[in-house]
Image (tube, coloured by chain):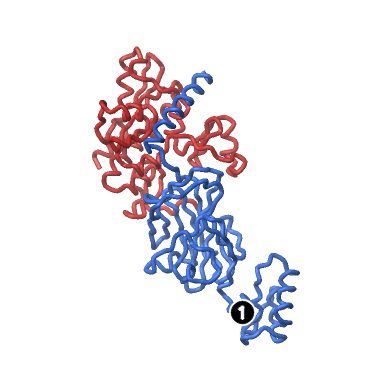
Chain colours: A blue, B red
C-alpha cells in the first residue's frame, strides 16, 4: 500500500512539474507568523514583523489576498509575491515615520499615513490573515526602545526585513547617555544612569537614554563611560 | 443563506462548470491543480474560480524543517501521520497539510472513473459519499477506506463548498471560512463554515 502511495506521489509530482511550466503552481503562504510588534508612545513609529516559522522554502505567496490587520486597520499586502527561498525569513511592515528614520532596516511594506497608529499599544489583535492572529493586552512597551515579542518577552527592538537587514533603534532618546536631559553626555548623567540600570530611576531621569541595547550591563557601562569621556 | 445551509449537510458540489474537453482541467481535477487555460482550480476534484481560495486550500504537502516545529501536538502527530487541531495542520510522510480535508485526500489514492467498477463509487466521485458495499468513501476522485477519516474529510469538504460559494461575494470571507477566522473586510467571524459572534482568535 505504501508502495502504491509512493508511486502516486511520483506521478502527481511529475504532473505538477510539467504543469509548473504552464504556471499552474504558485507559492504558498501559510507559515508566516506575527513575531514582534513595536510602538512609540504616540503610535507614530510602529512596526510589525512576521517570521516564516517553519523552514518552508516556497512560502512566497503572501500578497494579494492576505492582509495585515489590527482591530482598527486592514492593510492588504500588495503585489508582487516574494522571491524564495523564504525559510525562516522575516517581513517588516512599518509606519511612514519608522521608514523615514535614519538607520532603520528598510521596511518591506509601509502602512499608509491614514492608518497611523496602525495598532494600539494598549492591547490589540494583530493578524496576518487568514493564517495567524495574535491578541495581546497592555504589554507593548512605549519607551521607544523595547518591543514585544510573540513569546511575550520584551527587549530592545530588533526589526528585520526580508533581506535580513536589522538594526536596533532607540526612538526614545535623542542622545544616548544623556540621562539628565541636559543636551550633553557628561558627569551630570552618571547618577541618573546608575539609578536607571539598577532599576531605581527617579522622576526626570531619561530612562531610554540609559538603554544602549548591548545585551549586558558591563557592555552598557563601558559604552556610557566612553560617551562621558568623549 | 439557504444555499449555505443546503451545502453543509448535502455534500453537493458547487462552483464553476467544468470544461471536460480541456485536457489541463482533466489533469488538474485529479491532481489538485490550477488550469491556467480555463482559470479554474481543483481541490478534491471540485472546481473553483477563486485563485486565492485555491491557494489557501493548498492541497499539496509542504516540506518544512521538522526540528523547527515547536507545537507538542504537531511533534507527536508527525511520526504517526496525525492531525493537530490546534495548529490545523495534518502531517503525512513528514509533510504538512494545512486543513483536515487536504490532509485526508493527501494520504490516499486517486481513482479515475474508469478504474472503478462500482457505479455507486463512480457517482460518489462526482461529489462525496460513502459506499457501504465497497466500504470506500469518495471525496471527488480521492478514495478513502477509513470511515472516520472519510467523515473528517467530508466535514472539510462541506466547508470548502461554503467557501467556494462565498468567494463570489468576498474572497477574504472565503479564506476566513476555511480557517475559522474573521474576515477583516466584512468584519464577519466564521467557525465551522458559519458566521459567529466575533472572537479575537489565538490569544497570548
The single residue placed furthest to the top in the displayed view is B117
User: Residue at image x 55%, y 46%?
Assistant: A87
Locate residue A229: give its quadrant: bottom right
Front position in the image: B126 or B28: B28
Q: Chain of mark 1?
A: A
Front position in the image: B191 or A71: A71
Where does the image place residue B1, in percent across and percent down from the top left?
Answer: 25, 43
Above/below status of A3 relative to A115: above
Quarter of the image that includes the C terminus of chain A: bottom right
Above/below status of B70 relative to A101: above
Above/below status of A117 relative to A77: below
Front position in the image: B58 or B170: B58
- Report whether A153 appears left or right of B164: right
- Report whether B17 appears left or right of A119: left
The residue tagged with tag 1: helix, strand or loop?
Answer: loop
User: Residue at image x 26%, y 35%?
Assistant: B16
User: Residue at image x 41%, y 31%?
Assistant: A18
The residue singled out by tag 1 in the image is A175
Above/below status of B170 relative to A210: above
- Report whether A182 appears left or right of A123: right
The residue carrying pointer 1 sits among few (fewer than 14), some (14 to 19) or many (20 or more) residues within 10 Å by Cα, namely some
The single residue placed furthest to the front in the displayed view is A21
Where does the image place residue A90, in percent across and percent down from the top left?
Answer: 53, 54
Where does the image place residue B202, in percent across and percent down from the top left?
Answer: 49, 51
User: Residue at image x 58%, y 43%?
Assistant: B71
Amino acid at each position: 500500500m505504501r508502495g502504491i502511495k509512493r508511486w502516486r506521489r511520483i506521478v502527481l509530482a511529475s504532473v505538477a512539474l510539467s504543469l509548473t511550466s504552464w504556471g499552474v503552481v504558485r507559492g504558498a503562504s501559510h507559515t508566516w507568523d506575527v513575531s514582534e510588534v513595536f510602538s512609540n508612545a504616540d503610535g507614530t513609529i510602529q512596526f510589525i514583523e512576521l517570521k516564516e516559522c517553519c523552514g518552508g522554502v516556497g512560502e512566497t505567496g503572501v500578497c494579494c489576498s492576505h492582509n495585515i490587520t489590527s482591530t482598527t486597520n486592514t492593510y492588504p499586502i500588495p503585489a508582487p509575491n516574494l522571491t524564495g527561498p523564504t525559510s525562516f525569513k522575516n517581513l517588516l511592515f512599518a509606519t511612514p515615520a519608522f521608514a523615514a528614520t535614519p538607520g532603520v532596516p528598510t521596511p518591506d511594506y509601509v502602512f499608509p499615513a491614514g492608518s497611523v497608529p496602525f495598532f494600539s499599544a494598549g492591547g490589540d489583535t494583530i493578524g496576518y490573515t487568514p493564517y495567524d492572529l495574535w491578541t495581546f493586552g497592555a504589554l507593548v512597551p512605549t519607551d521607544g526602545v523595547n518591543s514585544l515579542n510573540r513569546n511575550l518577552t520584551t527587549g530592545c527592538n530588533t526589526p528585520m526585513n526580508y533581506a535580513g537587514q536589522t538594526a536596533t533603534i532607540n526612538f526614545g532618546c535623542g542622545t544616548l547617555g544623556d540621562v539628565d536631559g541636559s543636551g550633553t553626555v557628561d558627569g551630570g548623567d552618571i547618577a541618573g544612569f546608575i539609578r536607571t540600570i539598577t532599576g531605581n530611576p527617579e522622576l526626570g531621569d531619561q530612562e531610554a537614554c540609559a538603554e544602549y541595547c548591548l545585551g549586558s550591563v558591563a557592555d552598557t557601562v563601558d559604552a556610557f563611560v566612553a560617551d562621558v569621556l568623549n | 443563506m439557504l444555499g449555505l445551509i443546503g451545502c453543509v449537510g448535502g455534500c453537493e458540489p458547487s462552483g464553476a462548470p467544468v470544461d471536460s474537453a480541456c485536457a489541463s482541467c482533466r489533469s488538474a481535477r485529479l491532481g489538485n491543480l490550477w488550469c491556467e487555460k480555463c482559470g479554474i482550480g481543483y481541490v478534491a476534484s471540485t472546481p473553483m474560480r477563486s485563485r486565492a481560495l485555491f491557494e489557501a486550500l493548498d492541497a499539496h504537502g509542504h516540506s518544512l524543517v521538522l526540528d523547527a516545529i515547536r507545537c507538542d501536538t504537531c511533534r507527536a502527530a508527525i511520526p504517526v501521520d496525525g492531525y493537530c487541531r490546534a495548529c490545523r495542520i495534518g502531517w503525512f510522510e513528514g509533510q504538512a497539510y494545512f486543513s483536515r480535508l487536504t490532509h485526508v485526500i493527501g494520504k490516499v489514492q486517486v481513482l479515475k472513473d474508469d478504474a472503478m467498477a462500482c457505479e455507486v463509487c463512480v457517482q460518489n466521485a462526482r461529489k462525496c459519499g460513502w459506499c457501504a458495499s465497497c466500504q470506500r468513501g469518495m471525496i471527488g476522485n480521492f478514495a478513502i477506506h477509513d470511515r472516520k477519516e472519510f467523515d473528517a474529510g467530508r466535514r472539510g469538504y462541506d466547508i470548502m463548498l461554503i467557501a467556494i460559494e462565498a468567494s463570489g461575494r468576498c474572497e477574504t470571507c472565503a479564506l476566513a471560512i476555511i480557517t475559522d477566522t474573521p474576515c477583516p473586510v466584512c468584519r464577519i467571524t466564521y467557525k465551522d463554515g458559519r458566521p459567529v459572534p466575533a472572537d479575537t482568535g489565538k490569544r497570548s
